[in-house]
Image (tube, rainbow, N blue to C red):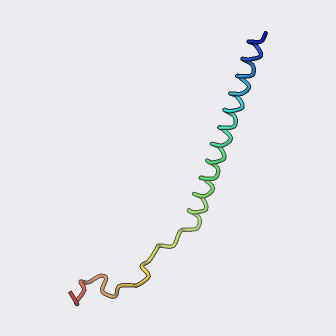
Amino acid sequence: MRKFWHWSFVLCHWSLVIGHLSLVIGHWLLVISHWSLVIGHYPLPIPQSPIPNPHYPFPNPQR
């Protein structure tokens, strides 16, 4: 009888662990999909150099 209680406890423990892991994985999938939707909906501004180079398309005449 003691072995039965031991295995039932082990099975209950692992089912709880697996359920918790699936909850965590589902939560992170929701968070990642939410943020990908937010980032896709609001496009990030293209980072521009703080000092614009006036001779960018052409070679620098001072060189």
Task: In this rendered view, identify the residue nearer to me: 44 or 53.
Answer: 53
Q: Relative to 62, is 34 on the left or the right?
A: right
Residue sitting at the far left? 63
4 lies above or below 47:
above
Question: Could you tell me which quadrant the N terminus lies in?
Answer: top right
Across and down, in percent, residue 58 comes to: 26, 84
Does residue 19 appear to the left or right of 63 in the view shown?
right
Q: Which corner quadrant holds the C terminus?
A: bottom left
In this view, the residue farthest toward the bottom is: 62
Residue 37: percent from left, percent from top: 60, 58
Provide residue 29's location: percent of width, then percent of height: 61, 47
x, y (%) of residue 31? 63, 53
Residue found at x 75% / y 22%: 9
Q: Tell me if 56 is positioned left or right of 2 in this view.
A: left
Q: Residue furthest top?
A: 1
In the displayed structure image, the side of residue 61 where residue 21 appears, left or right: right
User: Vertically, is 29 above or below 1?
Assistant: below
Q: Quadrant of residue 20?
A: top right
Q: Nearer the viewer, residue 52 or 17?
A: 17
Task: Determine which quarter of the picture holds residue 56.
Answer: bottom left
**Closer to the camera in the image, 46 or 50:** 50
Q: Closest to the observer: 27 or 13?
A: 13
